[in-house]
Image (cartoon, rainbow, N blue to C red):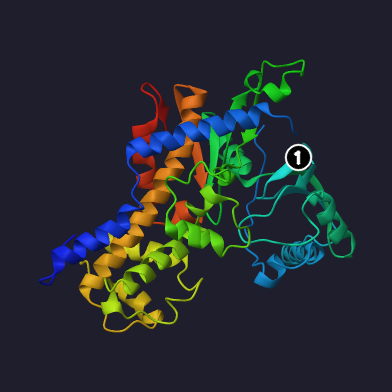
Amino acid sequence: MTILHMNGLILATKVSDVLATLHLGDETLRRIMNLLLKEMEHGLSKEGTSKADIRMLPKIYRIPHEIMIGDGDSLFDHIASCLAQFMKNEGLEGEKLPLGFTFSFPCAQSGLTSGALISWTKGFKCSGVEGEDVVQLLAKACRKRQDVDIDVVALLNDTVGTLMALAYSDHDCQIGVIVGTGSNACYMERIARCPKLEDDEDLAGEMIINTEWGAFGDNGCLSFVRTKYDDECDRHSINRGKQLFEKMISGMYMGELVRLVLVDLVQKGLLFHGNGSEDLSTRGKFPTKYVSEIEADRLSEELSYSNTLNICEDLGIENVTVNDCMIISNVCSAVSTRAAYLSAVGIAVLLNRMQKPSVTVGVDGSVYRFHPTFRFLLQEKISHLIDPGLNCA
């Protein structure tokens, strides 16, 4: 870090002390890997539960926050309304269409078209849905309308969808990962290694395991790497004490973690001469897209910090110095790097468990797609953590 004033060394040291809590060395990452592997093995052993002509017609519909935390009927009514609008726009009115229902939340799936929600994640808290079959709830909402007729032919997690989509063209794809609003992964596991299925007659094949790794650490095993910023972020979430691994990685929380560090630095007098702003002090006012934009400044040849300065202006922060921009950049880099390294831990655990010489990992999600350095940090750290002789693409 280059500091531009006389007390720079002292300031740099104090800022580095704050950011040190976010640093994860390889030894720590391998310890986390061992813990994750143990949790996976426990989860697998305990009782529970010709090319087609394809057209892609993507359409994104926003779910208002009041629906995300309202009642379940309103949520599924909204989804049915979006389906109806989509069918109208594409001239599909009056047709009965098969539907693949990607539902990105933990479910106890009892069949190809049946699954009960275990718990909400990613900021959703709709009442009357947990424990219920989400396919039936969607079908019920659609039956209320005269303008949408669908037949759910498959319920799947978004990680499974990612794996299957890439496996269509790359048969070495054995792992699907999402790093977006939330984070999760699935992988191909030998059925013989799933003790909960030991009574099945056919143990020769493989099956897709949805790890739900976002919940890793909920039992407290990650306390040794969690920071006071993680604790505060969790304390103000709607699912306190849940999805703790996800809260250290995903796009829903990355911006808030950066904001909390920046506020701490302001309060310590290490940033903005101790003067922040009302917006900076307000939860949710520092979205993860800010982190990506600030990280992009680091890659700019001019190093003008144009994105960083614009963001500070949006937040109502005045008299921002180049030194301030450098500190903000380092905070974003620390939080981003930690997220990428923790994601690499999860993927490396799966690769080491599978012990297949060559595996392609399908990764999707807004953080992976739009953060300028995330994928490179991820790939680099995976190569450091996997066993010798394994190859990951």
Q: Is residue 327 above or below residue 51?
A: below
Can I make out residue 103 in this image? Answer: yes
Near-viewer residue (271 or 72): 271
Residue 24, by quadrant, is top left
Q: Is residue 117 left or right of residue 246?
A: right
Residue 106 pos. (x, y %): 68, 46
Q: Is residue 13 left or right of residue 66?
A: left
Residue at image point 37% right, 39% down: 28
Split into 4 quadrants, where in the image is the N terminus?
bottom left
Q: Is residue 375 above or below residue 251?
A: above
Residue at image point 67% right, 67% down: 63
Split into 4 quadrants, where in the image is the C terminus?
top left
**For numbered disc 1, what is the local secondary structure?**
strand
Residue 384 pos. (x, y %): 34, 33
Residue 387, by quadrant, is top left
Near-viewer residue (71 or 204): 71
Near-viewer residue (80 or 278): 278
Residue type highlighted by circle 1: Gln
Residue 12 pos. (x, y %): 20, 62
Can I make out residue 372 in this image? Answer: no
What residue does disc 1 label? 109
- Tell me the crowding category of disc 1: few under 14, some 14 to 19, or many 20 or more residues within 10 angstroms, Cα based: some
